[in-house]
Image (spheres, grey):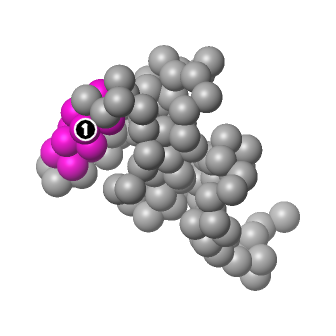
Amino acid sequence: RGVVVEVGQALPVQAFDEMEGLLLETGQLELLEEQYRRMLYLLRDNESPWIGELWKRLTLLYDQELKDRERARTALMAARQKNPADESLELELFPESDEED
């Protein structure tokens, strides 16, 4: 997915990508959410760009697969905070007209 990682991180990222693909393919979305959240917890003190990517993927899972806009917004805010230079986070996932007050 084009994530830049340090050499020591490459293997865990590749393994996570493979697990992610299997869980998506088999429709185990709640388990995938749990794995994103677990990885984010384990990496909480790390400054790797991988953390921003995980938050972005979690945002997309909430928005596109689980249809949970509130959680998607929260994950998107975290992704933007962790990786403010990522222009793909400027996606208009939540147009102003769709927001509920």
Judge by depth and name the residue closer to the eye, 94 or 91: 91
Could you tell me which quadrant the N terminus lies in? bottom left
Viewed as shown, does residue 30 lie left or right of 17?
A: right
Can you give x and y, in whole percent of width and height, for residue 70 in the image? Answer: 65, 53
Write down the residue under mark 1.
14
Crowding at label 1, few (<14), some or many (≥20) Cα neighbours within 10 Å? few
Viewed as shown, does residue 81 lie left or right of 24?
A: right
Can you give x and y, in whole percent of width and height, for residue 30 in the image? Answer: 35, 39
Could you tell me which quadrant the C terminus lies in? bottom right
Residue 93 location, quadrant:
bottom right
Q: Could you tell me which secondary element the residue under label 1 belongs to?
A: helix
Please name the amino acid that badge 1 sits on. Gln
Residue at 25% from the left image edge and 38% from the top image edge: 14
Residue farthest to the bottom?
A: 97
Residue 89 is a magenta residue = no
Judge by depth and name the residue closer to the eye, 43 or 47: 47
**What stretch of residues is rendered in magenta?**
12-23
Residue at 62% from the left image edge and 18% from the top image edge: 45
- Determine whether 1 is above or below 90 in the image: above
- Using the rendered image of the protein, determine whether residue 74 is visible from the camera's viewpoint: no
- Using the rendered image of the protein, determine whether residue 18 is visible from the camera's viewpoint: yes
Residue at 76% from the left image edge and 81% from the top image edge: 97
- Determine whether 85 is above or below 91 in the image: above
Viewed as shown, does residue 82 lie left or right of 23?
A: right
Judge by depth and name the residue closer to the eye, 82 or 72: 82
Residue 15 is a magenta residue = yes
